[in-house]
Amino acid sequence: MDKLFDLADRVIVVTGGLGQIGREFVVELHNRGAKVAVVNRKLPDKAAIADRFPVDSPNFGLFKADIVKKRELRSALDEIKERWGKVPHGLVNNAGVDTQPSAPPEVSGPFEFFPEEVWREVVDINLTGTFLSCQIFGGAMASEGRGSIVNVGSIYGLLSPIQDIYAYKFEETGTPFVKPIAYSASKSGLTNLTHYLGTYWAKKGVRVNLLVPSGVGRADQDPRFVKNYTARLPIGHMAKADEYNGAMVFLLADASLYMTGTQLVVDGGWTAW
Ligand SMILES: NC(=O)c1ccc[n+]([C@@H]2O[C@H](COP(=O)([O-])OP(=O)(O)OC[C@H]3O[C@@H](n4cnc5c(N)ncnc54)[C@H](O)[C@@H]3O)[C@@H](O)[C@H]2O)c1
């Protein structure tokens, strides 16, 4: 194995590791010999995910925690230490929630009427949950004097969503779909959480960076959404779910040892024009 990208035997936590992108990270890191701890608020039966995850591997573990609950994160850390005898070397703060174009008008309407409770819920998970995960897992990593944290942001945290992409929803239903503010604002918050912690822990050996992806294609997406979204992508197609793996391995591995407190934008060119 190339030492620059070697992750063998490193314990790496992936929050939200059962979702679309998280699964790709989990399987890739596991294939590279890492011990991968999936932290998720809901855990399925192992048998139900055996076709997609290496459930019988000694290097794979499922740990139940809601990232907005500090006590559950602490328990997950204790269980992970007990399981592999080590404080994690890596943390991927991937768990997050978004509002899809299929969402009902109550949670996707005009800014002026966007419900405060939905704002609070999204900010709670995407930003406060990442903060708590950094406190618990990152804090333990800092005590060991080593580690790499990768927060998962979004192009919608760098720039405003282009609302025209969703205009077809109005033509269809007569009700406008407005991509909500809460996702963008919460992902923007991760930018400075990353700057802050990257500098705060720099001399303690814990690096903190932000991966900034653009949208992933899915079979159930409306073709009009895919067409409009793709038109904004210089590269000409939405990402495949595994197209962020290279960047993730780079950020976790020694290849990026001199990189901290900053971001890696992997967006098919979205932000370049
Ligand atoms: N899919 C995309 O197109 C895209 C684009 C840019 C950024 N992202 C970001 O990538 C990350 C992963 O996205 P995805 O599409 O794979 O999401 P997903 O919805 O498929 O999976 C999210 C996972 O997080 C878990 N989760 C949600 N809230 C949680 C909580 N409070 N505690 C613990 N687990 C929780 C869910 O159970 C699920 O397993 C997210 O942060 C998302 O914002 C996704």
Image (cartoon, grey):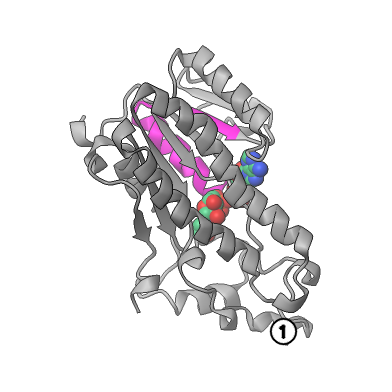
Is 138 placed above or below 271 here? above
Is 119 placed above or below 124 here? below
Position of 1 compared to 21: left or right? left
Q: In this figure, what is the number of numbered marks?
A: 1
* Ligand 1 is within 8 Å of the C-beta of the residue at disc 1: no
Closer to us: 124 or 214: 124
* Residue at screen point 67% across, 28% down: 71
* Residue at screen point 43% across, 61% down: 239
* Residue at screen point 77% across, 81% down: 175
**Residue type at mark 1?**
Phe
Residue 32 falls within the magenta-colored stretch: yes
Instruction: Report the residue that reaches farthest toward the right.
Output: 106
Residue 185 falls within the magenta-colored stretch: no
Closer to us: 213 or 93: 93
Closer to us: 195 or 255: 195
* Residue span colored magenta: 19-39
The image shows residue 12 at horizontal and vertical percentages of: 43, 30
**The C terminus, quarter of image:** bottom left
The image shows residue 183 at horizontal and vertical percentages of: 60, 62
Q: Can you tell which quarter of the image residue 233 is in? A: bottom left
Per the image, label 1 sits on a secondary structure element best described as helix
Position of 85 compared to 97: left or right? left
State whether residue 180 appears in this view. Answer: yes
The image shows residue 144 at horizontal and vertical percentages of: 37, 22
Q: Can you tell which quarter of the image residue 191 is in? A: bottom left
Residue bearing the label numbered 1: 170
* Residue at screen point 53% across, 12% down: 82
Q: Residues within 10 Å of mark 1 (few under 14, many from 20)?
A: few
Position of 14 compared to 69: left or right? left
State whether residue 240 appears in this view. Answer: no
